[in-house]
Image (tube, helix red, strand yellow):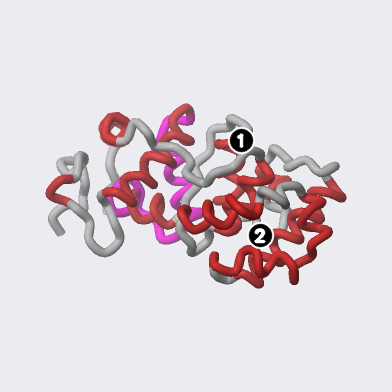
């Protein structure tokens, strides 16, 4: 499938910015470490559920040393309602241990170092870089993957390929904002099962609209 031109992509982003002026990271956090934990928990879980869990948990445990002291078994009941809690507990513990022992308790600010942490892939790393360290990055979650491929901005079969393709299609100064815009559009209009094509603000440019 022939993808949209960079000019059309710019127009789409302009429209989405006007449509979703409040687009932002919806995982509540007060530090890079809190966002790291929240993003690990967000895998196959809603932001609303994560925020409810972290809202209570972060009152008592919000630093790497807190989770290292707890250990995976005591982390599990704190995050159980987020799903896949055993694996997530191991990752939270593992990332906390690495940050505490190899980075002086401070979350690293480079992609290369972040993806070395347990449970941290490119998506999580990019979320942290863009929201906490002011670096332009495109985090490709399920919404970004679906929306950008469905519209025709890119035509890729994996999140990682989608990320690199988007980096070529979108101006760097718009990467981080574009991530939030695509998420908002995916949640509010371009849903997985029932996309609202008739009211979609970018339907005239979308290659999938009407199908």
Q: Quadrant of the C terminus?
A: bottom left
Residue 62 position, x and y percent, is 71, 48
Query: Image height check: is 45 above or below 197?
Result: below
Answer whether labels 1 and 2 touch (C-beta < 8 Å): no
C-alpha distance separating marks 1 and 2: 18 Å
Residue behind mark 1? 132
Q: How many marks?
A: 2
* Front-lying residue, 160 or 93: 93
Q: Quadrant of residue 79?
A: bottom right
Q: Earlier in the sequence, mark 1 or mark 2?
A: 2
Q: Residue 119 got which mark?
A: 2
Give me the residue at 54% from left, 44% from top. 28
The x and y percentages for residue 92 are: 70, 59
Describe residue 159's horizontal placement relative to residue 100 as left or right. Answer: left
Q: Position of residue 181 (x, y in %)?
A: 37, 39
Where residue 78 is drawn, which disc sits there?
Answer: none
Give the image location of residue 145, x and y in percent: 40, 54
Horizontal relation, residue 120 to residue 172: left or right: right
Few, some or many C-alpha atoms within 10 Å of disc 2 (few <14, some 14-19, many ≥20)? many
Q: Quadrant of the N terminus?
A: bottom left
Q: Secondary structure at mark 2?
A: loop
Residue in the image at 81% along x and 58% along y: 68
Vertical comparison of 177 with 45: above or below? above
Q: Is residue 160 magenta?
A: yes
Q: Which residues are magenta?
A: 148-172
Question: Residue 140 versus residue 70: which sits nearer the camera?
Answer: 70
Please check the rendered image and state whether residue 52 is part of the magenta-colored stretch, yes or no: no
Circle 1 Cα neighbour tier, 10 Å, few/some/many (<14 / 14–19 / ≥20): some
Q: Residue at x 27, y 34 (%)?
A: 19
Please name the predominant secondary structure of the magenta segment in the image. Answer: helix
Element under disc 1: helix
Position of 84 relative to 180 (above/below): below
């Amino acid at each position: 499938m022939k993808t949209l031109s960079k000019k059309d992509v710019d127009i789409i982003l302009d429209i989405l910015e006007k449509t979703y002026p409040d687009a932002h990271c919806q995982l509540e956090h007060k530090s890079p470490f809190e966002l790291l934990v929240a993003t690990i928990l967000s895998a196959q879980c809603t932001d609303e559920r994560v925020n409810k869990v972290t809202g209570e948990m972060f009152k008592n445990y919000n630093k790497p040393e807190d989770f290292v002291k707890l250990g995976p078994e005591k982390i599990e009941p704190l995050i159980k309602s987020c799903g896949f809690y055993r694996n997530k507990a191991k990752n939270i513990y593992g990332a906390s241990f690495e940050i505490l022992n190899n980075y002086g308790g401070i979350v690293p600010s480079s992609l290369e170092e972040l993806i070395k942490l347990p449970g941290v892939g490119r998506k999580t790393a990019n979320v942290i870089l863009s929201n906490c360290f002011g670096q332009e990055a495109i985090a490709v979650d399920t919404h970004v993957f679906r929306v950008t491929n469905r519209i025709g901005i890119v035509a890729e079969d994996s999140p990682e390929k989608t990320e690199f393709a988007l980096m070529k299609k979108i101006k760097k100064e718009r990467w981080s904002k574009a991530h939030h815009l695509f998420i908002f559009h995916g949640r509010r209009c371009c849903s997985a099962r029932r996309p609202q094509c008739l009211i979609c603000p970018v339907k005239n440019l979308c290659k999938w609209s009407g199908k």
